[in-house]
Image (cartoon, grey):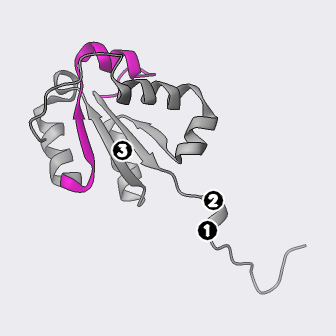
Amino acid sequence: MPALDPITSPQNPRIKNLLRLQQKASERREQQLTIIEGHRELTIAHQAGIEIRSLFVCPELAGETRQQELQATLGSLVEWFSVSKAVFERVAYREGSDGILALARPHNAASRRWTCPPTPYC
């Protein structure tokens, strides 16, 4: 993980935006972002082709091994932010999220191409 000064204030604009995204579906739709919390969930999303935009990592909670794994997997593809434990606990909406939270661009279900079978079952 790139060496960064940790975000230590809940008044930081990025943290405030993260909280707005958590609380308001209209914000998520407007910004076309969704929140992924936890190492396992982030790995599944990345493997499914979800575009990860930003990563908020609490080094105290994530641990060195997970951080190295994320660096190897995502590298410079995402914007990295280190956050203090107090800030992470403020933005985390569940326990056991491994100190990892990401903003991602969700797949748009409307843009998927659906094909019907040759003989409809109607």
Residue sitting at 23 percent across and 17 percent down?
A: 8
Looking at the rendered structure, the secondary structure element under dot 3 is: helix
How far across and down, in percent of the image, does residue 69 sit?
17, 46
| Mark toward the viewer: 3 or 1 | 1
The answer to the question of whether label 1 and label 2 lie on touching residues, with beta carbons closer than 8 A, is: yes
Given the image, on which type of amino acid does mark 1 rest?
A: Arg
Residue 73 visible? The answer is: no
Residue 54 visible? The answer is: yes
Residues rendered magenta in the picture: 76-98
How far across and down, in percent of the image, does residue 37 sit?
40, 34
Q: Which mark is residue 109?
A: 2
Given the image, on which type of amino acid does mark 2 rest?
A: Ala
Residue sitting at 49 percent across and 45 percent down?
A: 33
Looking at the rendered structure, the secondary structure element under dot 1 is: loop
Badge 3 or badge 2: first in the primary sequence = 3
How far across and down, in percent of the image, does residue 70 sit?
21, 46
Residue 51 is one of the magenta-drawn residues:
no
Q: Nearer the viewer, residue 49 or 51?
A: 51
Q: In this view, does 4 lie above or below 50?
A: above
Q: In this view, does 100 lie above or below 90?
A: below
User: In the image, is 31 to the left or to the right of 116?
Assistant: left
Residue 85 is one of the magenta-drawn residues:
yes
| Residue tagged 1 | 112
| Residue tagged 3 | 42
Looking at the rendered structure, the secondary structure element under dot 2 is: helix
Q: Nearer the viewer, residue 9 or 54?
A: 9
Given the image, on which type of amino acid does mark 3 rest?
A: Leu
User: In the image, is 5 to the left or to the right of 45?
Assistant: left
The Cα atoms of the two marked residues, 3 and 2, are separated by 19 Å
Q: Which residue is farthest right?
A: 122
